[in-house]
Image (cartoon, rainbow, N blue to C red):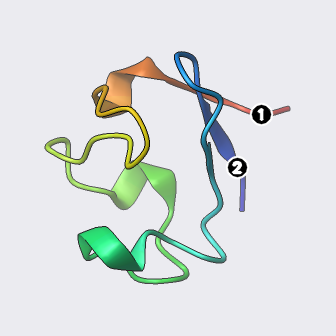
Amino acid sequence: MEKWRCTVCDYIYDPAIGDPDNDVAPGTKFEDIPDTWVCPDCGVPKSDFEKIE
């Protein structure tokens, strides 16, 4: 599964870990996270993330 990086603060969303503090279970693909989810470090929307190649 691909990792995604916040373009504002460089937080990395790793699907293997998820974001359990914000109800995103481990194994959740970035595409499957609700659009209302925001970066847990800086609060920007999901649209401000880019896929890490």
Residue situated furthest right in the rendering: 53
* Mark 2 crowd level (few <14, some 14–19, many ≥20, 10 Å Cα): some
In the shown orientation, is residue 42 left or right of residue 49? Answer: left
Give me the residue at 43% from left, 43% from top: 41
Give me the residue at 42% from left, 49% from top: 31
Give me the residue at 66% from left, 76% from top: 16
Give me the residue at 35% from left, 23% from top: 47
In the shown orientation, is residue 53 left or right of residue 22? Answer: right
CB contact under 8 Å: marks 1 and 2: yes
The quadrant of the rendering that contains the C terminus is top right
Task: Determine whether 48 is above or below 14 in the image.
Answer: above
Label 2, secondary structure: give it. Answer: loop
Task: Determine whether 3 is above or below 52 in the image.
Answer: below
Question: Please, what is the three-letter code of the amino acid marked with disc 1?
Answer: Ile
| The one of 44 and 51 positioned closer to us in this rendering | 44
In the shown orientation, is residue 11 left or right of residue 46? Answer: right
| Residue 9 pos. (x, y %) | 57, 25
Residue situated furthest left in the rendering: 36
| The one of 32 and 13 positioned closer to us in this rendering | 13
| The one of 27 and 44 positioned closer to us in this rendering | 44
* Mark 1 crowd level (few <14, some 14–19, many ≥20, 10 Å Cα): few
**Is any atom of residue 22 visible in this view?**
yes
Task: Determine whether 41 is above or below 9 in the image.
Answer: below
Residue beneath disc 2: 3
Which mark is drawn over residue 52? Answer: 1
The quadrant of the rendering that contains the N terminus is bottom right
Which mark is drawn over residue 33? Answer: none
Label 1, secondary structure: give it. Answer: loop
| Residue 5 pos. (x, y %) | 64, 34
Q: CA distance from mark 1 to mark 2?
A: 6 Å
Question: Please, what is the three-letter code of the amino acid marked with disc 2?
Answer: Lys
**Is any atom of residue 24 visible in this view?**
no
